[in-house]
Image: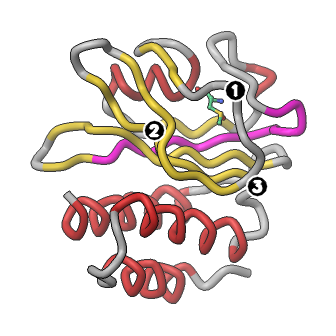
Amino acid sequence: MTNYSLLLQEAKGLLLNTALDKNTTLTKVCLLLQSTVEHYDWVGFYFANEVERTLHLGPFAGIPTDHTVIPYGKGICGQVAVSNENFLVDDVSAQDNYIACDIHVKSEIVIPLFVGGKNIGQIDIDSNVVNAFSEQDTHFLEQLNAAIADSLF
Ligand code: SME
């Protein structure tokens, strides 16, 4: 069982290291989460280009994806760019508007990253098991994104 409050403290510790640039810090956060939480198989950030209405892959941990640019509205990530709301998918095979990055992925969670009230991107986590995510993940990732917004943006 993951100790989420300890994990949040560890992630906040990484965010305090001002010697590192933003991308290096977020890569370390992705690696920390992916290596600590058993059901986090792919962890990454997408950032919004508001003019083009596209999301762009940022730091991530896990296998590389072909989907480095996602239009607003497309897939789970693109829907969150439009809705500004958390999206927890218990079973990706039941979703019509879904972009498969890896055939092994069974469930997904996407939590928007707000800076000054504006949705500037999101953290996206894939799991290779169905029903992997719960309210605990939602709460943890909301707190993590709030800490990232405070420290890095
Ligand atoms: N599955 C996502 C695409 C991103 S990959 O999971 C890395 C989606 O449907 O938007």
Task: Please name the residue that numbered disc 3 is placed on.
Answer: 41
What element does badge 3 sit on?
Answer: loop
Task: Please name the residue that numbered disc 2 is placed on.
Answer: 46
The residue carrying mark 2 has its beta carbon less than 8 Å from ligand 1 = yes
Question: Which residue lies at the image location 57% right of the left edge and 40% below the top edge?
Answer: 88
Whether 55 is drawn above or below 152: the answer is above
Marks 3 and 1, how far apart at CA: 16 Å
Q: Amino acid at mark 2?
A: Tyr
Measured as percent of width and height from the top left, residue 6 is found at 51, 89
Q: Are marks 1 and 2 in contact (CB under 8 Å)?
A: no
Q: Using the image, tell me which numbered label, if any, was put on residue 66.
A: 1
Q: Nearer the viewer, residue 113 or 89?
A: 113
Location of the C terminus by quadrant is: bottom left
Q: Using the image, tell me which numbered label, if any, was put on residue 16.
A: none
Which quarter of the figure has residue 73? top left
- Single out the mark in the foreground, 3 or 1: 1
Q: Quadrant of ligand 1?
A: top right
Q: Are marks 2 and 3 in contact (CB under 8 Å)?
A: no
Location of the N terminus by quadrant is: bottom right
Q: Which residues are magenta?
A: 102-113
Question: Which residue lies at the image location 41% right of the left edge and 42% below the top edge?
Answer: 122
First reached walking from the N terminus: tag 2 or tag 3: 3
Q: Mark 2 Cα within 10 Å, few/some/many (few <14, many 20+)? A: many
What element does badge 2 sit on?
Answer: strand
- Single out the mark in the foreground, 2 or 3: 2
First reached walking from the N terminus: tag 1 or tag 2: 2
Q: Is residue 4 left or right of residue 130?
A: left
